Amino acid sequence: MKYIFETIKFYDDNVDEYYKNTINLQETNWINKFLSYIWENSTILDLGCWFWRDTNLFQKKWCNAYWIDFSKNMINKAKWLYPKCHFYAMNMLKLEFESNFFHWVWANASLLHLNKKDINLALLEIDRVLKSKWIIYILLKEWNWEGVTNDDRYNKSKKFYSYYTQDELKGIINKLNYEILDFSINVEKTDDYSDKWKLYLIARKN
């Protein structure tokens, strides 16, 4: 899958600059919403964890967190920052966990790096490892397009994106027979780094 390797190379090559640019960018409102579902001793998967920025907050909630990312350099950066924690370089299309293992899955701007064929494979893997009646969070970007882009912020390094319409995302989740608990679109551009249109979703596995 050439397009995935291009995206992995982007993150491997730009890990330090990416860390500097994004360490303080968090979806605070949605993190707080997600935190409202979490309690002690539950188990969470951060799918595409970068350097542990988001689930740092979940860990403080005393949940058992597992962090995975395609990029080995991102994982190595996370291990360097937090040497006592456990991170895994892992393919989200083939999760190396037992079935029905997690209570929660946090997929914050990670599934958007898969094409629209492969996102279905990833969601089936998520469905396999997620316990029945438990929760997934997804952030994607809104539009109707997929392809490789050159990121001017990182010397035109290449990165693959898939964009989704609201109906498209809802259709994918409904096909899995998940109950959508919360859904919204953000239309605010808060800084030069953030994209304007983002789709947020929290859903429960039936």
Image (tube, grey):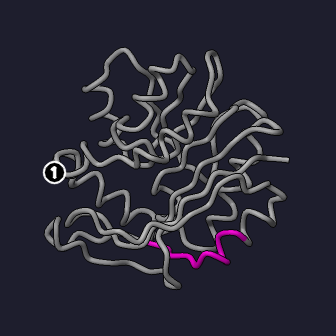
Q: Residues within 10 Å of mark 1 (few under 14, many from 20)?
A: few
From the top left corner, tell me how far across and down residue 91 is, in percent.
54, 48
From the top left corner, tell me how far across and down residue 79 is, in percent.
32, 27
From the top left corner, tell me how far across and down residue 167 is, in percent.
67, 77
Q: Is residue 150 left or right of residue 84?
A: left
Against 110, residue 126 (above or below) is: above
Q: Is residue 50 left or right of residue 38?
A: left
Against 203, residue 189 (above or below) is: below
**Residue under the point 70% across and 32% down:** 103
What is the three-letter code of the residue carrying label 1?
Answer: Glu
Q: Which residues are magenta?
A: 161-170
Q: Which residue is mark 1?
A: 17
From the top left corner, tell me how far across and down residue 7 is, in percent.
37, 63
Is residue 168 located in the magenta-colored stretch of the structure?
Answer: yes
Could you say whether the residue bearing mark 1 is in a helix, strand or loop?
A: helix
**Residue under the point 49% across and 84% down:** 145
**Residue under the point 69% across and 32% down:** 102
Q: Is residue 82 left or right of residue 160?
A: left
Is residue 119 located in the magenta-colored stretch of the structure?
Answer: no
